[in-house]
Structure formats: structure tokens, C-alpha cells
Image (tube, rainbow, N blue to C red):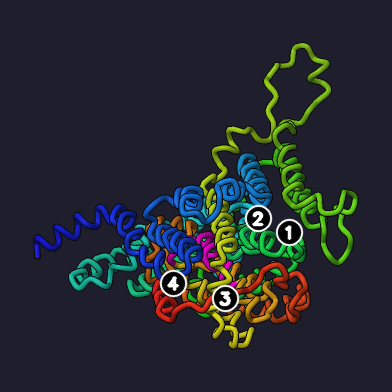
Amino acid sequence: EMKLSAVSKKLWCVHKQLILLLTPLLLLPLLFTLPEKEGKCLYVVVLMAVFWCTDALPLAVTAMLPVCLFPTLGILPSKQICPQYFLETNFLFLSGLIMASSVEECGLHHRIALKVLTIVGVKPAWLILGMMMTSSFLSMWLSNTATTAMMLPIANAILENLFGDLETLKQKSKFAEDPDSDIIIGTLHTFIVLLQVSVHGLHTEVRTMEEIQSESKIQLKVWKGFLICIPYAASIGGTATLTGTAPNLILIGQLKSHFPDCDLINFGSWFAFSFPLMLLFLFLAWLWIAFLYGGLNTRLCFKKDEQRSQAEARAKALIVEDYRKLGPIKFAEGAVSFFFILFAVLLFTRDPKFVPGWSVLFKKGYVSDAVTGVIIVSILFFFPSQKPSLRWWLDPQASNTPYVPLLSWKKAQETVPWNIMLLLGGGFAMAKACEESGLASWIGGHLQPLAKVPPAAAVILITAFLACFTELASNTATIIIFLPVITELAIHASVNPLYFMIPATIGCSYAFMLPVSTPPNSIAFASGHLMVKDMVKTGFVMNILGVLSVSLAMNTWGVAMFNLDTFPDWAHPLNKSAVIDDVHFSSVQSLNATV
């Protein structure tokens, strides 16, 4: 046994290298059992999927594999693959990220967070609501990871004021579980009684050890609820805007390459569809988290208690004090919020669909969301961060400090996650190859039996499947792998492709069950107070609520907005001859096994 455990430890140390060496060998049968081009393309897709799910290579490095594999295997020439890495969608994403770094630079996000918390009050269930509203609003514009990293310290500060130090809380709640501690408890109990008598005189009700213990258990639950609601709200909020999270941009990129004539989805129309969905899901998630941790139904919300109201008063004072420390709004904050609002308004009004937008002022089809983003973001690099004054010019004695813009390139370069840019590019390259090699339509042909499932049921199945798969792989990798297949499935079933593509894209962001599912979960988990079982228990119900919310949205206002009940002209594969080879049954089985 010793030898076995030693060997397994050694193997675990090199498991990533083993995956890198063995996966290409194990997948070789794909090259020989399938039609030539499709087989080669599927080989690369499955290889990248395995590397992404196991983290054998860094995500961004795996995303660059198409550049070397597709040309060498003869699937696509490199001059067709490389441009996929910086499409206009990437520019929209980049401008969103730079906008976010200017918000972080001037500290505007702190002001928003503290303001919301002063409004909602400090009762645990309401505080959780305030936290979730703030996190989801911020993650519509900032990245989900940045939002979580910023909100957790705020949450911890509030909790420490409400309940005191986390470690002492844990001690208190553990005390009575230890059989040897009876004597200690007896002594402690007497000590507490004496303390209370000396502090309050003899009129106080004596709190027993059990009361203190149950109290601290409830407080520990609230603490967990706080930590868990932030990454969840950030993931939900990211779905509301196109730039909020990478899968939404992959959807746009693939729509543009698959269906160049489809212009239904842009920043404004996506927001109009997914913002109400976000609000609905956020409300359901709040009810569930508050029920589980925040004492929606226990005495925590309602019963008056002298000590608790003192703690709440302290917490409220802390929030107000922190807000006061920020001082009046600085010039830089005002300027960034102005550009931030302008950024959003210009994106919404470019082509809102129901009224003509400002893009009619330019040549038709020339100005996209990316153009808008880059215009606004460029201004941040030269707009002054201090109020310009005439007196400075006229006063020779004034200090000649150098001119500081709202955002420096150095800061932008540090805060933009370049790996995500590569990941987006890898996704577009992979989708391009799937389409060109005929792999997507080949798989679509084999999914024919699924075309018989009623579309409304198919939406629930697709969303549920992707919400489960994304627990193990990154959201971006998941949507990259499955979107081309889902598109083909819709065409074969003669269903509007958006009817399957939109829920798939949103379902990918619903990664709630494991700490590794998505970076925000990992950050919250790293705080050390959450257990994996807490996440699984809370996340399982969250996934169900999410899937139900998405199918409700798709079948009600989604149908009305995007005409989902008709098969549109832009989806007719006029130039794509859907030739499906008669492939031998065994190869279908081998494909199923690999997928």
C-alpha cells in the first residue's frame, strides 16, 4: 500500500504533463474513423476541450493551439485563422475592460457600493439583498472577478462590525459540541452571569450558553450567506450586458460569422431582453439565499433584541462613516461617471431596433458597437483628472505639477485580463474551423433525433446541460465548444437559431456549484469560511431556478422581441449545401463516446 500511495502521489505531481502527452494519443482513432476533414477538426476540438477542462495548459495557451494545429493538419490556412483572434467583438470587450479599469482607478465603485448599503439597511436578509444588487449592477460593467474581489472586503468589514471577529464566533458556536467542555462551560457560564450582573445590575435576563451558541450559529450562517451571494450575483449580473461576460461576445461573434444577415442582436436589444431576466433570477436567488442563510423566516429579521440592535447600529455607523471618509465626489469620479453613462447611452441608442438610432447619421453598416466603445475609451487617456483652472495659467507662483489624465496606459495594461482576449480569439478560430471543415453540419446531421424534441423542452435541456457542463470547464470554453453544434441543431430542426443560442449562452454563465466553476466562486471560497458542500447545496437549487427563469424569458418576451416563433430568412442555408455523408454506424458510436 505504501508503494501504491507513493506512486499515486508521484503520478499526481505530473498529472498535467501526462494529460498533455496521453490525450493526443488516445484521440488518434478520431482521425481514422471519421471523414477526413471533419475527423481532423473534431480531433483538435476534443483535444482543446480536454486541455481546457483539466487545466493541463493555461487557458490562454490552449486558446492559441488553433494557430499551429489547423494549418498543419490542413484544415484552414493560417492567414484565415490568425485574424479570428482580433475581431471587432474583441474591441468592444477591450473597451469595456478599459472603462472598468478607469472606474477602479478613481474609486467610483466603492462609492456606489457603500451608497447602496446605506439605503438598504443592516438587517441580514436586506443586507444580502443590497450586496446582491450592488454586485450584479457592478458586474454588468466590470468583470465578474473584479466585482467579487472588490465586494468581499466590504462584506467582511460589515460582518465584523455586526458579529465581531470570525474566529471567536467559530469558537462560540463550537463550544457545546465538545463533551469535555462541560466543566469549562459551567465555569464560563458563571463568569458570564457575573459579568452581566456587574455590567447591567441585577435586572438583566441571563443568557444561557445554549442561547449564545445558537445565536453564533445563526450568525455564522449569515456570514456564509454573505460570502456566497456575492460571486453568485456577479455571475448573474454579467449576463445582462453584452460586455458583461465573454460568452455573450462569443455569441455575437459566431452570429456574425454564421449568419452575416442577422442584425437582431446588439448592445441595446440584448440588454432589453436579458436585464428583466437578470432581475427575475436575482430576486429568486435572493429569496433562496436569504431563506437558507439570512433568516428570512427566523427571528433574525423581526425579533427585537437589545444586543442585536446595538450591533446593527454599529454596522450602520460603519457604513455611513466609510461613506463619509470618501468625502465629496472628486472631479475624476464625476468625469468617469459622466463617460461611463455616455458609454452606456451611446451603446443603447446606436441601433435600438424599435426607433432609428444615431448610427443612421453614418454610412449604413459602417458603425458598430466596437466603434462606440473605442471612441469613449480613447477620451479617458487624455481627459484631465484634476479640475482645469484658469487661475493656474495666470499665476506664475502656482506649482507646475505634470498633467495627469483620467487613466494611464500603464494602469490599463495592468488591469486588462489579456488572457481572456486570447480565449475569445481561440473560440472564434475554433468556430471558424468547425464551420469551414463541415464538422458543425456533420454533428448537426447526427443530432437529427434531437430535432424531434419539442423546441420548448429542448431549450430547458440545452440550458440545463450547459449549466452543468460549465461547472467543470470555464464559461468561455463551454460556449466555444457547444455553440456551433447547437446552431446546426436548430437549423436541422427548422427552429430559429436564436431560440437555442441565447439560452445556451446565458446557461454558460450559471456556474454556481463548485469553487472551480468560475473565478468569482474561487475568490469567495478562498476566504476560507465556505465549504464545498455549502456551494453544492446552494448552487444546485440556483441552477434549477436559473434554467426555469431562462425558459420563461425565452418563451414570453424573448419570442416577442426576436420573432423566435418563425424560421427567419437569414438562417436559410442557401449557400451551404447540407450534404450529410452516410457515415458508418460505429463511427457515430465512437463520436458519442468521445463527446
Instruction: Decide which of tag 4 and tag 3 comes sooner along the chain.
Output: 3
Dot label at residue 580: 3
* Front of the two marks 2 and 3: 3
Callout 2 crowding tier (Cα within 10 Å): few <14, some 14–19, many ≥20: many
Instruction: Decide which of tag 2 and tag 3 comes sooner along the chain.
Output: 2
Residue 206 visible in the displayed image: no
57 vs 34, nearest the viewer: 34
Read off the residue under disc 1. 267
Q: CA distance from mark 2 to mark 3?
A: 37 Å
Q: CA distance from mark 2 to mark 1?
A: 8 Å
User: What is the three-letter code of the residue carrying label 1?
Assistant: Phe
Instruction: Decide which of tag 1 and tag 3 comes sooner along the chain.
Output: 1
- Residue 524, percent across and down? 45, 58
Looking at the image, do the residues carrying marks 2 and 3 touch, with CB atoms under 8 Å apart? no
Instruction: Decide which of tag 4 and tag 2 comes sooner along the chain.
Output: 2
Q: Which residues are magenta?
A: 472-486
Number of callouts: 4
Read off the residue under disc 2. 243
Read off the residue under disc 4. 595
Q: CA distance from mark 4 to mark 1?
A: 33 Å
Q: Quadrant of residue 347?
A: bottom right
Judged from the image, the secondary structure of the residue bearing numbered disc 2 is loop
* Front of the two marks 1 and 3: 3
Judged from the image, the secondary structure of the residue bearing numbered disc 3 is loop
